[in-house]
Image (cartoon, rainbow, N blue to C red):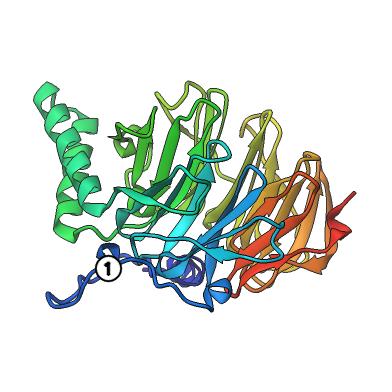
Amino acid sequence: MNQDLRNICALTLVLFGGMLGATPLSKAPPNVIEPMNISAPITPRAQHAALLGVALAGERMVAVGERGIVLFSDDKGVSWQQSQVPVGVTLTVVRFADALHGWAAGHNGILLKTIDAGATWTRVLDGNDVIALYQQQAKVLGEKEDNEQAQRATRQAAQLASDGPDKPWLDMNIDANGELWLVGAYGLALHSRDGKLWEPWSAHLDNPNDLHLYAIKTQGNEIVIAGEQGLLLRSMDDGATFQRLNSPYKGSFFVLELHDGEIVVAGLRGYAFRSVDHGGHFEPVILSAPVSVTASLRLQTGDVVLADQAGTLYRLAGDRLLKLDASAGSSPSAFVESADGTLVSVGRLGPSNISATLRP
């Protein structure tokens, strides 16, 4: 592994609670109960747990993190309650389709669903299900024809079966029609039109080296994925085909924002870029320090907020960048904005309310 990949793995350990190196995660001894088979611990210190994702469920804020901890707040982040969760694995991302129905995903291929705004959760998928889905796809493609896509699906299925159910999901997207996308480590990707039937999508991506996929965003028929070693993939036909964009950087992109043809990506060592033509050309966004960008959010105003690993905040309005006199907390990993503009970040030490200096 070169030094850039070592830096990527170290940063991922901070953000996602598990090392994503060049080799699969080691399997637990036979007498150890896997975290995906035990419930998340109920603890009075849950509010201080490392949190990695946060989203709105109507007016409620819902955050997810280490050991399967899920918190929700009905007072804009002032106080938090812990949810009942059937798994104890680290959860990395949470998204809601509406005020009640949402999804959370994380390590060991876990995907959870809620129908009560995050108060309780049920398991939908785990790593064993992911392996079975990839094996089924490889079988179907192999029976149809022996092409590059079929060969890749067969290779991925065999590798997953050999490694075991250990791979983490790193991002998720739900569109207005309830269509879901999951992306994760080692190039894993799943797609579902209804949240019930799932199909592996890795073989559709121009990612022959199975680079980690850190972020995905959709708008209309456009889908953009950002990942390891500067990987940028774009679809303009609702995911039927993906093309690799000419990347402006060879380091990893951890965050991605997409809106009306504008793409903002940022990541390792504070490198950030903006495109206004669907990724045809990128211009650099110069941050004040070479610190990796780990969180982003498009505000209701249309501006994009970026945070680096030190908690430094920036607001990007068009091509104008402003460093803000506020902090996103320790190792921020995600933001959420309430209807009245209240902004909350989550990170290594739990949730943080951010100063109103973010207002234009």
Left or right placement of residue 86 versus residue 265 in this view: left
- Using the image, determine if residue 192 lies above or below residue 168: above
Identify the residue position indicated by label 1 in the image. 25
Nearer to us in this view, 250 or 216: 216
Quarter of the image for residue 170 reads bottom left
Give residue 252's position: percent from left, percent from top: 52, 56
**In the image as oriented, which residue stretches furthest toward the left?**
143
Quarter placement of the N terminus: bottom left
Say few, some or many: other residues with alpha carbon within 10 Å of mark 1 (under 14 / 14 to 19 / 20 or more): some
Nearer to us in this view, 120 or 224: 120
Residue shown at 50% from the left, 72% from the top: 14
- Using the image, determine if residue 150 lies above or below residue 129: above
Badge 1 marks a residue whose secondary structure is loop
Asked whether the viewer can see residue 249, the reply is: no
Left or right placement of residue 263 versus residue 287 in this view: left
Give residue 95's position: percent from left, percent from top: 52, 45
Amino acid carrying label 1: it is Leu
Left or right placement of residue 292 versus residue 158 in this view: right
Asked whether the viewer can see residue 188, the reply is: yes
Nearer to us in this view, 177 or 185: 177
Residue shown at 73% from the left, 68% from the top: 289
- Using the image, determine if residue 312 lies above or below residue 120: below
Give residue 202's position: percent from left, percent from top: 32, 39
Give residue 84's position: percent from left, percent from top: 42, 61
Nearer to us in this view, 131 or 207: 131
